Amino acid sequence: MAGWNLRDSGNHRLPGGVPIDVRLCLACALLLLSGCGPGLVFNASPHMSSEAMLARASHVFVGVIQTQGFDSWPFFRLNIPGEDPGNAKYWKILRREIQIEMVLRGSERRRVVDVYEISWADGATGDWNSTRAGERALFLLRVESGRYHVVRDRWRSIFPITSGPHTRLPLDDSRPLWERIALMNWWMERSDRSARITYPYFGYNDPGDALGFWRTVKLERGLVRHPSAGVRVPACRELLLLGGYGQDECWEMLSSEDRAHLSDSGFLCCSAEEITAVRKGIGESSASLLWARYPDREDRRLLTAINNRKLRDEFCRLYECEYPGDKDNGCPADQPPPATIVTELGDVPLPGAWPR
């Protein structure tokens, strides 16, 4: 081998007299190397919108992660222009085995599939695709080289599902997919006391930002009436964490035992002293100043549901004056703030207790 001259295009012989063409040997080596790669198109745009992610997705699944881990691709080496070449070793092929529960886009007959990601294997900060086996999630995928590949590597494109399992989405195909996905995350089909929200908080319930602030708060108010503490406590926590908006009447609805779980999952929420201080600050505020501070209509809808009767009366007067005919608010002030729950028909009013 040491005596070969690669500039010589003539035939050579291996030991034993077998002829070999050097050019053929090199071509075969290149084919071998290219065949060992994953065939995945790397995309780690940190600024990709939810609509852009959905547009890139040929398939959308809801499924449960069975296993996950880095696969061995001996010849895979990702070098990103402008990045330290030494970082190439930290990019690995991560494979997740997914048991599919729902196919929301595309078609797939198999119950279990592999989903691939070009993932950063060193320490990381930010909103990346952090997942664990056993979690239920939404997967936005593309088919590349016969493999399912997430639409965005490293950065969030796999979204936790907080409720479920589900066999269908609310509403029908005439409504945007992101809206139906968001409502599914608020859909508690089980009304028994063992139901729970499986993710510690609601941060990814609306990954496409399809519902809006006011609509989301009404859904949280509905969940506060659920018979399971595993649902009502996280819902009340979300309302309490709104702080200055005064959406905190659920504090009185919780038992002492429920309140003890408000700090579960590492949350710094919410002591009786903190609730008292927030309410005192709101009570000393001027309605006109708060109205001017929050010029967005979504915020002002929240002000009409504030847990302070005097301020709420004034906000209802201001709202009806500025937005005549708009009934989607917390008025009249002498009635409980509006609450909704999700059914197959979408989010519908909840006038009383949680239905059995």
Image: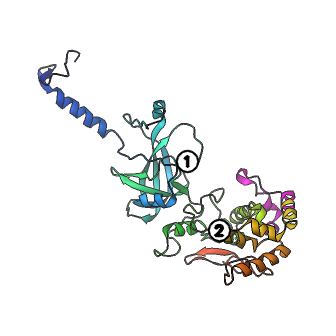
Q: Which residues are magenta?
A: 249-276
Residue designated by label 2: 216
What separation in Å lies between label 1 and label 2 (alpha carbons)? Answer: 24 Å
Q: Amino acid at mark 2?
A: Thr
89 versus 128 height, above or below? above
- Crowd rating for badge 2 (residues with CA inside 10 Å; few <14, some 14–19, many 20+): many
163 versus 125 height, above or below? below
Please name the residue shown 66% across and 65% down the image: 194
Residue designated by label 1: 128
Q: Are marks 1 and 2 in contact (CB under 8 Å)?
A: no
302 versus 62 height, above or below? below
Rendered-image quadrant of the C terminus: bottom right
Please name the residue shown 81% across and 71% down the image: 288
Question: Farthest bottom residue?
Answer: 325
Please tell me which of labels 1 and 2 falls first in the chain: 1
Q: Amino acid at mark 1?
A: Trp
Q: Secondary structure at mark 1?
A: loop
Left or right? Give the position of 239 relative to 67.
right
289 versus 321 height, above or below? above
Rendered-image quadrant of the N terminus: top left
Magenta stretch encompasses residue 73? no
Is residue 227 visible from the viewing direction of this image? no
Q: Position of residue 52 (x, y in %)?
A: 46, 58
Label tally: 2
Q: Secondary structure at mark 2?
A: helix
Q: Nearer the viewer, residue 19 or 5?
A: 5
